[in-house]
Image (cartoon, helix red, strand yellow):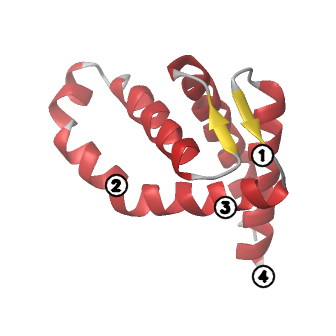
Amino acid sequence: MSLLISWILYALAIIFIAWLVPGISVENFSSAMLVCVIIALINIFIRPIIQLVTLPINFLTLGIFGLIINALLFMLAGYLAPGVHVDGFLSALLGSIVLSILSMVINGLVWKH
């Protein structure tokens, strides 16, 4: 049950990000739900490989390069999801930062016992 609630809250967070960040648009709630699934799949399958490959760069930049990785993966999710559009890197960077902050809030609300 908490997985479904979490999924809905993440979709609402995506819609909020589209409202807040210029350059990001979401057509409807089902597009937001789909982009949540795509982001989850990217985080499961692609992110670990990219983090391993870019570990030296991430180490040298003290983790700042992780923001670039997040933005690029956010852009990829927007590209793959129909009904979701991310204009450019700056929009993706701001969107990924806001999504990270909202993720902490959502995880604190949903998984708190």
Earlier sequence position, callout 3 versus callout 1: 1
Q: Quadrant of residue 20?
A: top right
Residue 55 placement (x, y as % from top left):
20, 37
Q: Is residue 39 above or below residue 92?
A: below
Q: Position of residue 36 (x, y in %)?
A: 64, 57
Q: Which residue is mark 4?
A: 1
Dot label at residue 101: none
Residue drawn 44% across the image and 28% down it: 67
| Dot 2 and dot 4 residues touching (CB under 8 Å) | no
Q: Earlier in the sequence, mark 2 or mark 1?
A: 1
Callout 1: SS: helix
Q: Is residue 73 above or below residue 39?
A: above
| Secondary structure under the numbered disc 4 in the rendered image | loop
Query: Upstream in the sequence, badge 3 or badge 4?
Result: 4
Distance of mark 2 from mark 3, alpha carbons?
17 Å
- Residue type pointed to by label 1: Ala
| Residue indicated by mark 1 | 13
Q: Which residue is mark 2?
A: 46
- Neighbour tally class for label 1: few under 14, some 14-19, many 20 plus, Cα within 10 Å: some
Image x and y of residue 44, in percent:
41, 63
Residue shown at 60% from the left, 63% from the top: 37
- Neighbours of disc 2 within 10 Å: few (<14), some (14-19), many (20+): few
Alpha carbons under labels 2 and 1: distance apart: 22 Å
Do residues under tags 2 and 3 come within 8 Å of each other at their CB atoms?
no
Nearer to us: label 2 or label 3: 3
Labels 1 and 4: the sequence-earlier one: 4
Query: The disc labelled 3 sits on which kind of residue?
Result: Leu
Q: Is residue 65 above or below residue 16?
A: above
Which SS class for mark 2? Answer: helix
Front-lying residue, 91 or 81: 81
Question: Residue 34, labelled with which disc?
Answer: 3
